[in-house]
Image: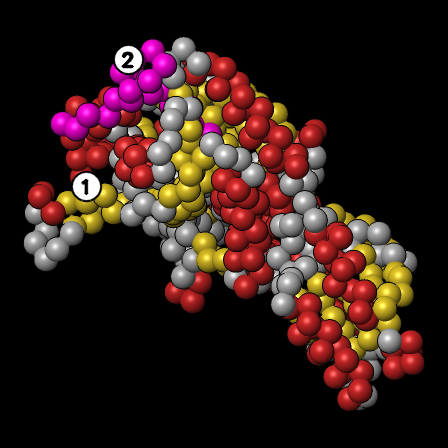
Amino acid sequence: MSEVKMETLVSLCKRRGIIFPGSDLYNGLQGTFDYGPIGVELKNNVKKAWWRSVVYERDDIEGLDAAILMHQRIWLASGHVEGFTDPLVDCKVCKKRFRADHVEEKDFHKFRVLIQKEGDDWEDTGKTLYAESKKSAKAQLTSGVFAIPQEKHIRVEPVEGDVFHGKRCPECGGELTEPRQFNLMFKTFIGPVEDEAALVYLRPETAQGIFVNFTNIMDTMRRKIPFGIAQIGKSFRNEITPRNFIFRTREFEQMEIEFFCKPGTDEEWYEYWVNERFNWYLRFGIRKENLRTRSHEKQELAHYARACKDVEYNFPIGWSELEGIANRTDFDLKQHQKFSGKDLTYFDEETRTRYIPYVIEPSGGVDRAMLAFLTDAYREEIVRDRPRVYLALHPFLAPVKAAVFPLLTNRPELVAIAKKLTADLKKEFYTVYDDTAAIGKLYRRQDEIGTPFCMTVDVETLSDQAVTIRERDTMEQERIALDKVASRLHEKFKL
Ligand code: GAP
């Protein structure tokens, strides 16, 4: 498990305008988050880093931005209507819902609930509950499930020897229903009539938008196999238990490639893509010790996959999936050929034969990648007896590239130079000007959002036409001529 606590990241994100709970003003909407001014920059940079690596730096991948709303038959063909389900259990007592596979099996002890009558007399209420400990049993009493007036003195007493091992409600210890399959797709209607024919789904993966455009792209871009299509976009899943900040949400973004190849070459391409994607995270700053791959067991595989390997990151919640690379075989194109009645075969000019291409799919989450980059970059240290927090983000990902401060705000000449430097740098990098606090505080703010460089304009600047540039990670300061700042930054931001 990462040493960085999730609460620490959540609080930093809220404090610094990176991520807010969704619908915060109305006390939140579970499983949604809003990216603030700094967060949207980080998110855009993560997407840019991906697009650059998979589209611009290669010559075998095309980009796409397909619609979120797609024909309902697409989801019948893909198997999502039938099979995109999670097992769900309800608590019979507090009525809360959970994913059956997210509820841990534990030992639960039975407790009697007693209330105090007059004096020292205690009366058995006849109510019992199951809990892991006396403390959690007491906590359940205040959860409102037991409907005992708060002003009464209540206590719990273990019923000796009555232990239940298994799954019970993680919130109140109540009995759970048998698991039922619950489809994760959000539904809506297209047009004014809300009937079956008008039913559409919000896409639960961007992948299908790629499959249904396979021939459009191959034909218009005159592509031959092997080649891939890359897409970044929102996906929606009605997750039963969204949790762990932006790790599992109901609305999230995916970065997906469907790489079409000749059957028989699929295993080689699969290994290739696992490697490529693993190295992409390292390239943008994730430390190797926090990254690993894990092959899916047969029973874990999605309905469309022959093999799947996850790139896992050591999140604050422990090792978990960051991205999955799957061998989807010819499953999807075959299904769409069947459901659409259109020919999706590829004509191989070399062998003069037709086949349905196999597909290797590297599929990552933008939000999850952000969480990994934030976790990995988070640093705390003591500098001159004071704690310093900074994000050692890769310069390409840093939301703000440079900040400019005038040392004295009561000297208009310094303010003017600082504003001019900001305006000049803004043409090339996202640069901010700040004079709303003392210099130490301004540095602290920029450190916490991972700004690689801060420049201070001081009285000396008037005579030497230079500024002090401070580097985020080392805090080293250097004097640099005003007309050299842009080229210095260029040097640092080169990929
Ligand atoms: N097209 C294949 C596919 O969608 P997936 O493993 O279900 O595969 C791929 O999802 C990636 O999308 C995951 O590795 C994760 O990064 C991200 N993802 C999936 N569900 C998510 C959720 N509820 N919240 C945030 N990210 C999610």
Q: Would you say residue 351 sits in the magenta stretch? A: yes
- Residue to which mark 1 is pinned: 71
Viewer can see residue 253: yes
User: x, y percentage for residue 56?
Assistant: 53, 42
User: x, y percentage for residue 111?
Assistant: 44, 33
For the record, the magenta segment spans 341-362
Measure the C-alpha gap from mark 1 to mark 2: 31 Å
In the rendered image, which quarter is residue 405 located in?
Answer: bottom right
Q: Is residue 219 left or right of residue 164?
A: left
By what rule are the colours in the image chosen? secondary structure
- Does the beta carbon of the residue at mark 1 sit less than 8 Å from ligand 1? no
- Residue to which mark 2 is pinned: 353
Q: Residue at x 47, y 32 (%)?
A: 60
Q: Quadrant of the N terminus?
A: top right
Q: Secondary structure at mark 1?
A: loop
Q: Residue at x 48, y 19 (%)?
A: 269
